[in-house]
């Protein structure tokens, strides 16, 4: 039996799942934060608030944006376990599409996808991820998407597919792609227009969470306990004084808080720059993707001063990978990519 399935690209990162799909010839993208805990939630008081209670095997899970019991999704095993299956299904439901059979294009950290020793595909990991996502899962009082097939792609490098194709590079051009995500730093060196991936790098110690953790700590010290989502929002909107005042209860501490956040951002930037220079000393171009790209851009531009404009911050960097994977797997469709729709998913 053949099933006609819609193709959806899902960059299932450790902190946020980015989903891109094509609807009415337009590319659409959502970002769905990961925040699940064990057991179920009771029915919502407000009728417009949906409760997402899931069952995998005999284990019950629920989506809970602000829970302090949220399960860790920041370890490598996440790629192959219940939480990943949950995160992907939950993100698909946030698209607003009616549940249907889907073929997914998902991602694995670059050092899981390729064997770091010889840059060959790690078929065992790829198959493990595919099988994990085709497992059974149920949504209480609701319908889920049916995942009928799964294609796996590496993180980071494919995010610059179209940028590279349109950049007149030759077969010797070496492009360094840096993906600074919530909890990991992934890098790869691409030769030419994707003729080859010549080196890969992964570091689970460096990510935006360094800044998020600090922000939560300084907020708590100013009598303003904040969830991960709020702390992240503060980092993004730190130049928007109105927003800052809403989040920080003790206004006398605003300057000190913002200075500490800026310092941590600079620290993240220099940590990435040091690793990047060690990994690729003299690339011809550098591309920055992932949610943390704009935070680290100044430090990376400074680390590669001779490259000037060839250090490129990719537009809407957090969802760049999902968008590119979607476009790449839908190249027979005439897609209107401008203007683009990026819908932030509400936090509860
Ligand atoms: N414009 C922005 N400015 C600052 N931070 C941002 C911006 N956009 C996203 N972020 C932050 O980036 C982080 C998430 O990035 P991303 O979605 O790339 O991570 P991920 O793919 O889940 O993680 P990983 O790749 O480490 O598994 C979050 O902390 C989010 O708040
Ligand atoms: Mg990521």
Image (cartoon, rainbow, N blue to C red):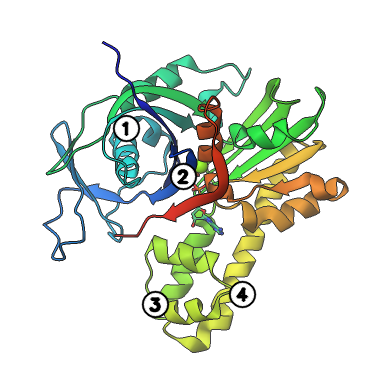
Q: Position of residue 208 (x, y in %)?
A: 54, 54
Q: Position of residue 258 (x, y in %)?
A: 57, 75
Q: Is residue 130 above or below residue 30?
A: above
> Which label belongs to residue 259?
4
| Dot 1: element | loop
Instruction: Out of 322 and 4, give the one closest to the viewer.
Output: 4
- CB contact under 8 Å: marks 3 and 2: no
| Dot 4: element | helix
- CB contact under 8 Å: marks 2 and 4: no
Q: Position of residue 115 (x, y in %)?
A: 56, 21
Residue labelled with disc 2: 28
Mark 1 burial class by Cα count in 10 Å: few <14, some 14-19, many 20+ = some
Residue farthest bottom in this picture: 252
Residue labelled with disc 1: 81
Residue 93, by quadrant, is: top left
Q: Which quadrant is the C terminus positioned in?
A: bottom left
Instruction: Out of 19 and 27, give the one closest to the viewer.
Output: 27
Q: Position of residue 200 (x, y in %)?
A: 63, 29
- Residue drawn at x 48%, y 73% is 218
| Dot 2: element | strand
Relative placement, left or right, of 51 versus 264 is: left
Q: CA distance from mark 3 to mark 2?
A: 35 Å
Instruction: Out of 29 and 13, give the one closest to the viewer.
Output: 29
Residue 68, by quadrant, is: bottom left
- Residue drawn at x 53%, y 44% is 184
> Which label belongs to residue 224?
3
Q: Earlier in the sequence, mark 3 or mark 2?
A: 2
């Amino acid at each position: 039996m053949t099933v006609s399935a819609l193709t959806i690209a899902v960059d299932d990162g450790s902190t946020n799942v980015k989903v891109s799909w094509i609807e009415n010839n337009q590319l659409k993208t959502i970002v769905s934060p990961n925040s699940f805990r064990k057991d179920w939630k009771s029915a919502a008081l407000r009728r417009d608030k949906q409760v997402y209670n899931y069952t995998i095997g005999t284990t019950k899970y629920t989506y809970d944006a602000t829970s302090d019991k949220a399960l860790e999704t920041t370890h490598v095993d996440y790629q192959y376990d219940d939480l990943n299956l949950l995160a992907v299904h939950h993100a698909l439901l946030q698209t607003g599409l009616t549940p249907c059979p889907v073929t997914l294009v998902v991602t694995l950290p670059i050092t899981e996808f390729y064997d770091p020793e010889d840059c060959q595909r790690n078929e065992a990991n790829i198959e493990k991820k595919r099988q994990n996502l085709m497992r059974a899962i149920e949504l209480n009082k609701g319908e889920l998407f049916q995942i009928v097939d799964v294609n796996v792609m590496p993180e980071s490098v494919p995010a610059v597919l179209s940028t590279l194709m349109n950049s007149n590079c030759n077969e010797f051009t070496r492009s360094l792609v840096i993906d600074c995500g919530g909890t990991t730093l992934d890098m790869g060196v691409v030769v030419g227009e994707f003729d080859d991936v010549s080196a890969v790098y992964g570091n689970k110690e460096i990510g935006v969470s360094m800044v998020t953790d600090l922000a939560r700590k300084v907020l708590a010290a100013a009598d303003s306990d904040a969830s991960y989502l709020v702390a992240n929002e503060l980092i993004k909107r730190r130049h928007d004084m109105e927003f800052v005042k809403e989040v920080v209860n003790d206004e006398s501490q605003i300057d000190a808080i913002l200075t500490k956040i800026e310092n941590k951002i600079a620290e993240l930037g220099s940590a990435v720059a040091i690793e990047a220079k060690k990994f690729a000393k003299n690339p011809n171009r550098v591309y920055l993707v992932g949610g943390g790209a704009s935070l680290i851009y100044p430090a990376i531009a400074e680390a590669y001063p001779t490259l000037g404009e060839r250090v490129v911050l990719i537009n809407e960097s957090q969802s760049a990978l999902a968008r590119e994977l979607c476009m790449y797997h839908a190249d027979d469709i005439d897609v209107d990519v401008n203007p683009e729709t990026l819908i932030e998913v509400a936090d509860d």
